[in-house]
Image: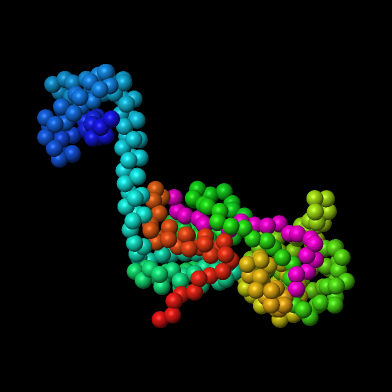
């Protein structure tokens, strides 16, 4: 099948005239007429009703035209995707991410990204609020936790665990804990960036489940702020693993009640609805996915 003939036929139906179709395509009317006639012979059916005043599709032509539009659009998309894939990332990449994940992973990755693609610059907004991507002209959002229904396009790139942690100053008191119901004896730091900062559901294995409603001695509205207070000995709190992994490994924090698990969450990239994503977005997401798998950030090369 000759795709050019499909394009010629579609142009005739769209414009209602061989002459106007030829003008749109930049070729002669004779070529359009010949190619459409050949298409009808190939298909063995009449696609157009021709009169001195107008050209209109037959019933078969109307149905075939709808299919042609889809085929030609898919072909155009394929060429555009290849062109975009081959293009070098350029321009300003606008990203929004939560304070905790953005500080731990996205901000260092922005340095590596701009070093790798010097024709790009990054504008990163760190906020625990859900920003509007369209009005804010944001190319990419990183959402950590649980997505709400949205008309936006989203892709899960990873997950995280929530961990109950504390400073080593509480080591002796933590050693006495046996279950989540015992947590009321210790100070707790609430994260006001969460929808339910004091109500938590713990599980152990398949059968044990306990809900704990904690009492806050300190409440802070950003996750990095909660981490700083925990490390300073202000109390226990629940934080994502990507934020506390290094401190746990170095002994600066203790994992409290490690036999009990808290709900895990997802890490998603979210995009405005669009047919194509610019190379700068695709390249950054590729780097982010690689860093997420390693849970480490590539360093920008030294100047």
| 276 relative to 269 in the view: left or right | left
Q: Nearer the viewer, residue 252 or 18?
A: 252
Q: What's the residue at 52%, 52% (across, down)?
A: 155
> For the N terminus, which image quadrant?
top left
- Residues 283 and 191: in front is 283
In the picture, residue 120 is in which quadrant? bottom left
Image point (75%, 70%), residue name: 255
Residue 107 in view, yes or no: no
Closer to the camera in the image, 295 or 232: 295
Residue 17, position in %: x, y?
18, 29
Q: Is residue 276 above or below residue 182?
A: above
Where residue 146 appears, as percent x and y from the top left, is 62, 55
Left or right? Give the position of 277 relative to 106: left
Where's the C terminus, which quadrant? bottom left
Q: Is residue 190 above or below residue 278?
A: below
The outermost residue toward the top is 45
> Residue at image x 50%, y 55%?
270
Q: Quadrant of residue 265?
A: bottom right
Q: Does the magenta portion include 148?
A: no
Whether residue 293 is visible, yes or no, is: yes
Residue 85 lies, in percent from the top left, at: 36, 54
Residue found 62% across the figure and 58% down from its top = 159
The range drawn in magenta is 254-273
């Amino acid at each position: 099948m000759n795709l050019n003939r499909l394009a010629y036929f579609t142009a005739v139906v769209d414009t209602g005239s061989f002459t106007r179709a030829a003008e749109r395509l930049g070729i002669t009317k004779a070529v359009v007429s010949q190619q459409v006639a050949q298409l009808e012979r190939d298909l063995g059916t009449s696609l157009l009703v021709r009169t001195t005043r107008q050209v209109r599709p037959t019933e078969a032509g109307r149905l075939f035209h709808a299919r042609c539009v889809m085929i030609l659009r898919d072909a155009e998309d394929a060429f555009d995707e290849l062109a975009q894939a081959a293009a070098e990332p350029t321009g300003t990449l606008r990203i929004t991410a939560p304070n905790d994940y953005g500080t731990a992973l996205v901000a260092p990755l922005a340095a590596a990204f701009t070093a790798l693609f010097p024709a790009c610059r990054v504008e990163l907004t760190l906020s625990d609020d859900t920003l509007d991507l369209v009005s804010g002209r944001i190319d990419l959002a990183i959402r950590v936790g649980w997505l709400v229904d949205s008309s936006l396009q989203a892709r899960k790139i990873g997950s995280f665990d929530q961990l109950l942690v504390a400073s080593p100053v509480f080591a002796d008191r933590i050693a006495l804990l046996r279950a989540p119901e015992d947590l009321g004896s210790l100070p707790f730091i609430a994260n006001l960036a969460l929808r339910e900062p004091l109500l938590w559901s713990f599980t152990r294995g398949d059968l044990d489940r306990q809900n704990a409603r904690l009492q806050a001695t300190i409440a802070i509205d950003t996750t990095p702020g909660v981490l700083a207070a925990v490390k300073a000995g202000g109390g226990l709190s629940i934080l994502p693993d990507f934020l506390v992994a290094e401190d746990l490994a170095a002994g600066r924090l203790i994992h409290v009640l490690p036999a009990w698990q808290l709900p895990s969450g997802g890490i998603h990239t979210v995009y405005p609805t669009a047919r194509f994503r610019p190379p700068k977005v695709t390249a950054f997401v590729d780097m982010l996915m690689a860093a997420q798998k390693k849970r480490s950030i590539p360093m920008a090369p030294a100047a």
